[in-house]
Amino acid sequence: MLKANREYGGGCLCGAIRYRVTGPSLFETQCCCRDCQKATGTGHTTIVGIARDQLHIDGEPSIYTSAGESGGAVSRHFCGTCGGRIFTSGALPGENVMIQAGSLDEPGEVTPENVIYGKDALPWDHFDPALEIYELYPPFDPVTREPT
């Protein structure tokens, strides 16, 4: 987990976009949904949930918005030069955003807690056996969006 009151840096492959994020993270997970598979070209992506105001960006990311499985808008923020993904925002997480763990300067600071959208997991994509795999996502309070 990203630690409280510690600042972490990150950015895209070419360096045109840099960011700083201040911990703590809200969650750290691996997502196997088909949208993440298509967006990354692999079996899953590792994401770090934070409040939007914890993220400070230098540079102007390009944005691609599509409808997620929930029907809500999902916006992927990426470098328009190298295509490196930075973060995802959308209707469901509201004021929270999801940083691409691989875009951090120190991605080893991330420790996934679980796997979401396991229903879409590919048979060749393997996970730490200690992680719980949810068919969709862990249960949460629909009002507070806190885990239950």
Image (cartoon, rainbow, N blue to C red):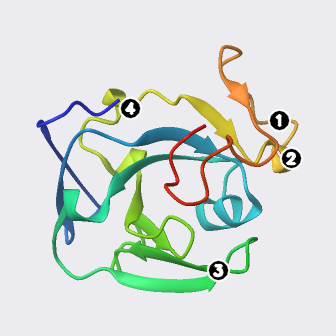
Q: Quadrant of residue 40?
A: bottom right
Amino acid type at circle 2 is: Lys
Which residue does the numbered mark 2 point to in the structure image?
119
**Separation of disc 1 and disc 3 at Cα?**
29 Å
Give the foreground label among 3 and 4: 3
Measured from the top left, where is residue 88 in percent x and y? 46, 67
- In the image, which disc is placed on residue 110? 4
In this picture, residue 44 sits left or right of residue 20: right
* Helix, strand or loop under label 3: loop
**Separation of disc 2 and disc 3 at Cα?**
19 Å
Q: Earlier in the sequence, mark 1 or mark 3?
A: 3
Q: Earlier in the sequence, mark 2 or mark 3?
A: 3
Which residue does the numbered mark 3 point to in the structure image?
72
Give the foreground label among 4 and 1: 4
**Separation of disc 4 and disc 1 at Cα?**
23 Å
Q: Earlier in the sequence, mark 2 or mark 1?
A: 2
Q: Between residues 82 and 117, which one lies in front from this camera angle?
A: 117
**Separation of disc 2 and disc 1 at Cα?**
14 Å
Q: Residue at x 70, y 25 (%)?
A: 132
Badge 2 vs badge 4, beta-carbon distance below 8 Å: no
Q: Residue at x 38, y 32 (%)?
A: 110
Q: Residue at x 51, y 74 (%)?
A: 90
Q: Pointer 2: residues within 10 angstroms few (<14), some, or many (20+)? A: few
Look at the picture and state if 7 lies above or below 129. below
Give the foreground label among 2 and 3: 3
Which residue does the numbered mark 1 point to in the structure image?
124
Q: Residue at x 76, y 37 (%)?
A: 134
Q: Between residues 55 and 78, which one lies in front from this camera angle?
A: 55
